[in-house]
Image: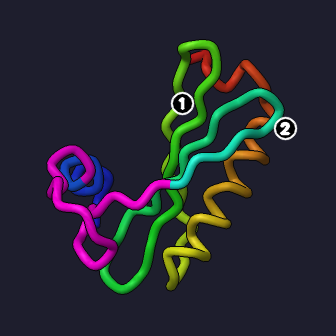
Amino acid sequence: MGLLSNIKEFLFRPTEEGSDKKGARDSQHHEHKGFSIETQPLKEGGSFRVQGWIRNDGKEHHFIRADQSHSIEGCHELSLFKAKQCIDQLGDSIFKS
């Protein structure tokens, strides 16, 4: 599946809730070093892809990683780990283009 297909699926995903539907929303909110983190694994086939948002002072950074997990709980943990790693390494510079 190509990058454009992934973007298209993300933008036009169903709005129904429930973890068994493709693109379904199941988010968790966390705080780390003053940043707000929202993890929202992206369902792809039988697994979940790491995805989330990092926010601070009205700024937002959306991330999608190649990492996947077979469980949504594991993907939330992995998404949170990746977000914290980004914050620790980049700080506020994460919001620069």
To which residue does mark 2 refer? 88
Q: Earlier in the sequence, mark 2 or mark 1?
A: 1
Element on which disc 1 rests: strand
Task: Report the disc number at residue 22.
Answer: none
How would you rate the neighbour count of disc 1 (Cα within 10 Å): few for under 14, some for 14-19, many for 20 or more? some
Q: Is residue 16 left or right of residue 10?
A: left
- Please give the name of the residue rendered at 61% of the width and 16% of the height, measured from the top-left corner: 96
- Please give the name of the residue rendered at 83% of the width and 32% of the height, measured from the top-left corner: 33
Q: Is residue 20 left or right of residue 80?
A: left
Spot occupied by residue 63 in the image (x, y as percentages of width and height): 52, 43
Q: Is residue 74 left or right of residue 25?
A: right
- Please give the name of the residue rendered at 59% of the width and 28% of the height, measured from the top-left corner: 55
Q: Is residue 83 above or below residue 67?
A: above
Q: Is residue 36 left or right of residue 45?
A: right
How would you rate the neighbour count of disc 2 (Cα within 10 Å): few for under 14, some for 14-19, many for 20 or more? few
Q: Amino acid at mark 1?
A: His
To which residue does mark 1 refer? 61
Element on which disc 2 rests: helix
Q: Is residue 74 magenta?
A: no
Query: Residue 75 is drawn in which quadrant?
Result: bottom right
Q: Is residue 29 above or below residue 18?
A: above
Spot occupied by residue 20 in the image (x, y as percentages of width and height): 28, 79
Query: Residue 11 is drawn in which quadrant?
Result: top left
Name the one closer to the observer, 10 or 14: 14
Q: Is residue 12 magenta?
A: yes
Name the one closer to the observer, 67 or 32: 32
Q: Is residue 86 above or below residue 81?
A: above
Q: Quadrant of the N terminus?
A: bottom left
Magenta residues, start to end: 10-27
Name the one closer to the observer, 57 or 9: 57
Q: Quadrant of the C terminus?
A: top right
